[in-house]
Amino acid sequence: MRQPLFIQPVLQEKMWGGTKLRDIYGYNIPSEHTGECWAISAHPDGVGTIVNGAYTGVGLDELYKTQPELFGNPSSPVFPLLTKIIDAADALSVQVHPDDVYGMEHEGELGKTECWYIIDADEGAEIIYGHNALSQEEFAEKVQAGAWNELLRYVPVKRGDFFFVPSGTIHAIGAGITILETQQSSNTTYRVYDFDRVEKNGQTRELHIQKSLDVTTFPHVDAKNNFVIGDTVTTFIESEYFNVYKWNVTETFTYKQTAPYTLVSVLEGDGVLEVAGESYAIMKGMHFILPNGIADVTVNGNFEMLVSTPGPKSL
């Protein structure tokens, strides 16, 4: 009998991080500057571990390689998705990610298309989403001049917003924002601007101007969000790399799995997950995978969950 795979996440310190991952979700954070919970990850920079059933103690990367039937016998050589909860106590750097072709050629890993669900945001919080340059040359000139307010697009955000961030999109998460990020399994980031901050060693972080110019989309085009809002399930996006949904469960909801597998993060609430006659207590801050072979699951309780499945390029 297939069971859900509950994951022990990996906590990552970041100079811009804070304490919300402890204060809200109860995680044992490594410091007062903890920025990321790698919730479901098989990336070598932060591998989650199975914490229940026959695979207890096994890393998700190893499980994906040795038990491919749990994931529908995929063709992707690496587990293709990575989900995070990000606590941006301070702003992240202005950055951009490559596509798969550039990422494999220059970094030896996938590119990075991602998306953000805004869990919470301080009043007045903003993200940087896109730029105003019409060409690579204009972009380079404004970077050289430090004309950031002319170059960058600032977008106010609030709880419940969703943004699709394809590779090639200039972006930054602003201060006071907590998000659930669904992304390709990649840790390649090219920094364009880091607000002249210095690390503990007194050095500024490396910038990657030429690579950023190589991969940025010109001119910027906002990704279209075509939400489908239902009583329980909201469809945020169905894309080539991932599909992302929100489940707002009140009392009981039955999910009929048609995807090869499903990633679930519990953002609010507690209750019971029922799979093939077995019951599992679930609560805020838990993350799990419904592997291939589980057809129907029932959720009982009051929940807000972010759910993702692989898109066609991630199979």
Image (cartoon, rainbow, N blue to C red):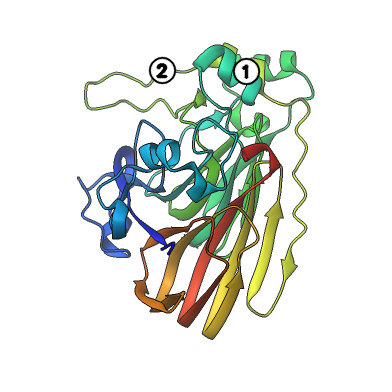
Give how far across and how far down residue 182 sits, in percent.
54, 48
Residue at x-position 48% and y-position 54%: 179
To which residue does mark 1 refer? 102
Left or right of 115 in this view: 135: right
Residue at x-position 49% and y-position 56%: 291
157 and 273: which is toward the camera: 273
Left or right of 48 in this view: 147: right
Give how far across and how far down residue 172 sits, in percent.
53, 39
Where's the C terminus, which quadrant?
A: top right
230 and 220: which is toward the camera: 230
Give how far across and how far down residue 259 sits, in percent.
63, 56
Residue at x-position 64% and y-position 16%: 213
Which mark identifies residue 66?
A: none
To which residue does mark 2 refer? 206
Does residue 42 appear in this view? no
263 is higher (above) or lower (below) than 150? below
Give the CA distance from mark 1 to mark 2: 19 Å
Q: Which residue type does callout 1 highlight?
A: Tyr
